[in-house]
Image (cartoon, helix red, strand yellow):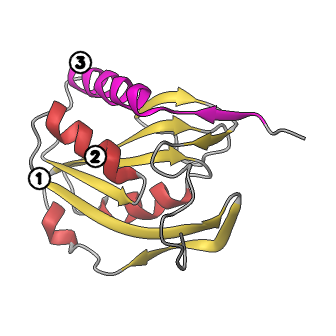
Amino acid sequence: MTVEREHLSWQAFGDASREMAQAIADDGFRPDVILAIARGGLFLAGALGYALTVKNLHVMNVEFYNGVGSTLDMPVMLPPVPEPVDFSAKKVLIADDVADSGRTLELVYSYVRDYVDEARTAVLYEKPRSIIKCDYAWRHTGLWINFPWSSQEPVVPGLGS
């Protein structure tokens, strides 16, 4: 049995990130900081940083998925965790590849929201079951997504691949 999946190529990712950057700019939002949720959000954060001329990028490492369709009970921030003061009185754009359940985005948003001037969220894909409704989503889907950076087996297998 073949499960239908959403496939994102590198070319489509380039187009998607550019379209998203344009939507953010057209909306008048000018982030001071882009906060990437690692690992999948690193790609989008970098692309948005270049397109929106934002050089101040931070990373939060959050573990939630531990396999295809398999998660921990709750998302967990992994060290090093940025200090909330790094976001004080700033406009922050939180970037991730997908809002599946939305729990990872909720964790990161909750961590910074009391310190920032404004926080918005941007994802390539938002799923209908996400508890966070993102400010910017390139596409909406209920399907599992094959991203170009994670659709092949690792070259070096390891824990938490």
For the residue carrying disc 2, how many other residues have a C-alpha within 10 Å: few (<14), some (14-19), or many (20+)? many
Residue at horizontal 15 percent and vertical 70 percent from the top: 85
Is residue 24 on the magenta stretch?
A: yes
Instruction: Say what amino acid the circle numbered 2 marks.
Output: Ala
Q: Is residue 155 magenta?
A: no
Eyeballing the image, is 46 above or below 79? above
Q: Is residue 119 visible?
A: no
Give the SS element for disc 3. Answer: helix
- Position of residue 112 relative to residue 19, above or below, is below
Residue 16 is situated, as x and y percent measured from the top left of the image, at 39, 26
Q: Between residues 116 and 149, which one lies in front from this camera angle? A: 149
The residue pinned by badge 3 equals 26
Residue positioned 52% across, 27% down in the render: 139
Task: Please state the horizontal and vertical placement of residue 155, each as a whole percent of the image.
Answer: 48, 65
Q: Which residue is mark 1?
A: 56
Q: Which residues are magenta?
A: 4-26
Query: Three-letter amino acid code at disc 3?
Result: Asp
Q: Give the percent coordinates (x, y) of residue 118.
A: 24, 46
Which residue occupies the extreme right position in the image? 1
The residue shown at (52%, 77%) is 158
In the rendered view, does 79 fall on the left or right side of 82?
Answer: right
Tell me the residue that label 2 is attached to: 45
Q: Residues within 10 Å of mark 3 (few under 14, many from 20)?
A: few
Residue 86, can we see it? yes
Q: Secondary structure at mark 1?
A: loop
| Mark 1 nearby-residue class (10 Å; few <14, some 14–19, many ≥20) | few
Specify which label sits upstream in the sequence, 3 or 1: 3
For image coordinates 13% across by 55% down, the residue present is 89
Quadrant (top left/top right/bottom left/bottom right) for the N terminus: top right
Q: Nearer the viewer, residue 93 or 89?
A: 93
Q: Nearer the viewer, mark 2 or mark 3?
A: 2
